[in-house]
Image (spheres, coloured by chain):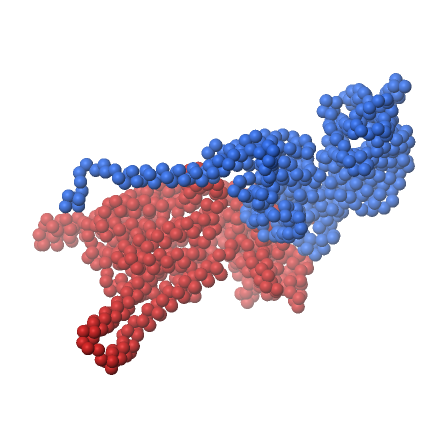
Chain colours: A blue, B red
Amino acid sequence: MCVKQLVIIFFVVLAIQVFSDSSIDDVQVRQDLFNVKHQTSFVNEKVTKQIDLSALVPTQRIEIKTAFKKKGEPSSYFVTFQKDMSEKIAFIKASMIDGTSLEIVKDNKQSINGYSIYSINFPKEESTKKFHFIVELDLINSQIPSPKTVTQKENCFLVYTDNIFFYTPYLTKTQKTEITFPTNFVKSHTKLTPTELSGKKLVYGPYKQINGFSQADLKVHFQNNQPLPRIRSLTKTLTVSHFGNLFVDEYYVISNEQAKLVGEFSRLDYSRNKQLSARGSFQDATLHLHEKAYGFEYFDIIGNISTSQYTKTSGQTVVNLKTRFPIFGEWKTDFHFTYNIPLKEVLAKSKKTGLYRLTFPFGSSINAPIEDFEMKIILPEGTSKIKSEIPFGVDSQSFQVYNEFLDTTGRPVMVINKESLVPSHNQNIEIFYDLSFINMWRKPLLLVSIFFVAFCLIILISRINLSLYKSKKKQD
Amino acid sequence: MSWYPLGRVVGGTVFPGIMLTAGSLYFFLKKIVRITVNIKHVCVFMGPFFASNASLITYLFTKEVSKDYGAGLISAVMIAIVPGYISRSVAGSFDNECIAIFALILTYYLWLKAVNTGSMFYAASCALAYLYMVSSWGGYVFIMNLIPLHAFVLILVGRYSRRLYVSYTTLYILGTLLSMQVPFVGFQAVQSSEHLAGMGIFGLIQLVAAVKYVKSILGEKYFKLFLKILGFIAVSILVLFVAVGLATGYIAPWTGRFLSLLDPTYAKKYIPIIASVSEHQPTAWSSYFFDLQSLVFLYPVGLYYCFKNPSDSKIFLILYAVTSTYFTGVMVRLMLVLAPICVILGSMALSNMFKLFAYKIREFDEEDKKKKKAQSKKPTNQKKKKKTEQNKIFNLGYIAATLMIALLTALFISYIFHSIWVTSEAYSSPSIVLAAKGYDGNRIIFDDFREAYYWLRQNTAPDAKIMSWWDYGYQITAMANRTVLVDNNTWNNTHIGTVGKAMVKTENISAQVMEQHDVDYVLVLFGGLIGYSSDDINKYLWLVRIGGTVDPSIKEEDYLNSRKEFRVDSQGAPSFLNSMMYKLCFYRFWEVKTEGNKPSGYDRVRNTVMGNQNYELEAVEEAFTSEHWIVRIYKVLKKENRK
């Protein structure tokens, strides 16, 4: 049976190789993927792939009903993605249909040549061999404007490409793919019967008996006049002061990924009719901050930006920032936003370990994907045993030393870097560290001792007389 | 980069003082004290910091002149808030003048100290202060003319002394040598006619010293003959020097700015770029009161005290007051130079008058006490006591003195209130952010300049060349970080004239000029939508005049209608209504309704409907217009892309 299926898959691969002009590398990779030992261990009974293109960040929700076909304990379930898809995945999450989350881990050993393999381990106590679970993806760089340039009064269109089928190593009995568009207007889409477009919804399938690693190119071209804000880079600097304050500086470089504006930008048209002449542009950004945040500053290199508001609601502070000018397609701007939070709101001391625990959200609360994220946590001088706990993988973590205000040995800075963030990454991370009480008083003591020494010196100097002869007044 | 494509030698065209000061303060704070501070913060607080220094120096100066602590203290209070100086020393005014006034008062203080003591140490310190002044502001010429004038007057009135000789020669030699180290000044310090007075007096003082020495050796009889011969030789040598100097060009001709000081109409006639600056206009009478308030009345009183009891330093004060008053009449900007002397003289007047009347009251009190003592010795009589009390109340002198003190105090208080009011109303708001009150009393902020500049910074090619009138050159360079053709450092009038030409000629000619200069964007200011009056249309005639210096075909009368009026409505001159600047400013403005009961295209600055309407732009396209239309930026189209 195993051999038979292998043969079938081999032919499928051959067919794909013939019809799509894939390189030898791809064949090699797919053959490597055959080595996923458990490819026959599961059979997907029903797969529903839902692609949501209406939101700013396109998401995929793949609902899988699968059955373990071998004896014994169910092994890992593998979720695979092709090269171009795996580059677009910014965030991945898996959960059982009842909501209990599943651990999904990228298998770096087996992910080759851009193809990525994630493995899911089902809970051991599960006695059945059938599983019903959901894999959710947040995508980045997945929509491309087409045409690439528009004038101020033209509509904007986007192109989204994907695989119609769920790219899985296992046999799938029935599969359906649903796409939701932001508007009714869909310029073109791939057809693979049965295909049905009604309103904002495009449905492919259901298709029966799909072999593993099946592929059918999907391309949709649709209207989207919403802006596509994109944070090109965000540097978030936290300065922890144990005298009771946490200072946060967020530096944003923000752009619009919509089609580039060419020709005139007419302020008259823009202010007269935003519906017709402000397509794809934005001027607002909303931040959701900690309830106790205070002392906001919104500025760029040439000074304060005079348009911002904040409101305190229960549980959070909502800050509405307006950029200096409207951001059209491929325009950009940058700004700093800084604020303070009372330290006691985000810092706790563990009684068990004696370590401090700083809890702070990662990423940005602005609803936009981030290309390049850097978080710097500047801890007080003398901090030791610094550890971080982040619920997802990051690209790098390193330490720097920072010198400011009377620092002697310098403050340790933890630097966390990650590329391709989506709003789902806006989760709390935790930093643990140790700081002895005496370190807090280092600077006051330093100042006190400097002044003490200075006064002592002055006292000494004023009492030393180095003159060779006594002045006349004294002689008198 | 600025002044594309010429470029500009920064060291040779600006005074380095303010940059050096800010840089060294920043270095001191950041690297030595290790305070986290941004260079911007240092720059912002330079004004107030140096104003406080100036306050301290003014105290010393006044004390040195009047030998009166009270006057010194009053002058320190007054200079701290005098509107004429606060206009340049509020936080954020990072200008040459903000350190120059401090340097000016310091130099004068050290000069008087040197003259009063005859100490070479003070004269040398004065030379150092003079160096600082030279490196920071073009107004140093005022020092190099006032001090020689002082020396000259002292010699004339027979107050020549060895102290004067020592201090003047030390200052002149050291000061001139030091000032030549500043690249912007260089050999001008000995060559240009502005510095000639210093050199002449230097020669004269040598002569006087020599004559005094010879007189002490020779007898009266021979001395007269000697004097005649010497005078003849001296005059002929001087004439020869000046003639040779002028002929060979070693002595530079009078530069425009200085000449316009002596002859207020000079600049208007010959150098439009100097006359076009509002700060170079003659001062209106009201602005004397606005910037000096009660000092206007007090400083003549101070002058009176100077005349009444003259000394070397009081003569200096008189000269300073007279010359600076004259100069402010020529140029508003020099109000800054007048403010310190007004403060010093005013505080001397106040202090003297306070003293006068306070002594009067004390005299009465002492008399009273004496009488009381006398009475207490005698057996008291109730009737007599009442009489004395009545005497005290109705004593006219006592009442007058009390009244005068009350009046002076009121004057002083009103000065303080006025200064605070002026500072908050006129001098505190940044000129780059405009504010207005809305119908509901809310403050509306017009942040158009920074909006447009930041747009340029973010969304144009980094090497884009931007053409605008020179007033916005520095702002574009700093805020937009882009290359400009001309900026506020008006060192090349031809280039500015070319920009003027490109703005006032028709679109075709303008396009040619812009193409020749590789211009990518044109930036204009237009206030017609919200009523911002200092826009490019109101500066238009200056563009014409300055443009006319490079292209004689640009004549002012062409831009005025038959009744010699400059109008933007349909009665305006056709060459204006078809010029590039008009087209850029008013493009599609005819579609806008600015006021409810007025037709569309109503200009709220000129209070009229725009004349030339419904035209198309061919050589340029609108690239960005700020929210309230104050800044309009156009992209220059390449020839093949034009309509």
Q: Which of the 4 image quadrants contains residue A262? A: top right
Residue B532 image offset from top left, x and y in percent: 56, 59
State the residue in front, A153 or A72: A72
Q: Residue at x 47, y 58 (%)?
A: B427
Question: Where in the figure is residue B14, as x and y percent of width and height?
Answer: 43, 45
Relative to A445, residue B473 above or below? below
B643 to the left or right of B396: right
Residue, x 80% and y 21% (percent of image)? A36
Closer to the camera, B474 or B87? B87
Please identify the residue farthest to the bottom as the structure is shown: B383
The residue at the far top in this view is A3
Q: Is residue A336 above or below residue B529?
A: above
Q: Quadrant of residue B268?
A: bottom left
Nearest the eye: B288 or B549: B288
* x, y percent for residue B537: 56, 58
Q: Position of residue A471 (x, y in %)?
A: 18, 42
Left or right, residue B362 beside residue B218: right
Q: Quadrant of the N terminus of chain A?
A: top right
Closer to the camera in the image, A413 or A197: A413
Looking at the image, which residue sits at the far front?
A352
Could one spot residue B158 in this view of the protein?
A: yes
| Side (left or right) of A52 relative to B311 | right
The residue shown at (74%, 53%) is A275
Q: Is residue B272 visible?
A: no
Q: Which residue lies at the image location 66% right of the left edge and 36% below the top edge?
A: A371
Q: Which quarter of the figure has residue B614? A: bottom right
Q: How many marks?
A: 0
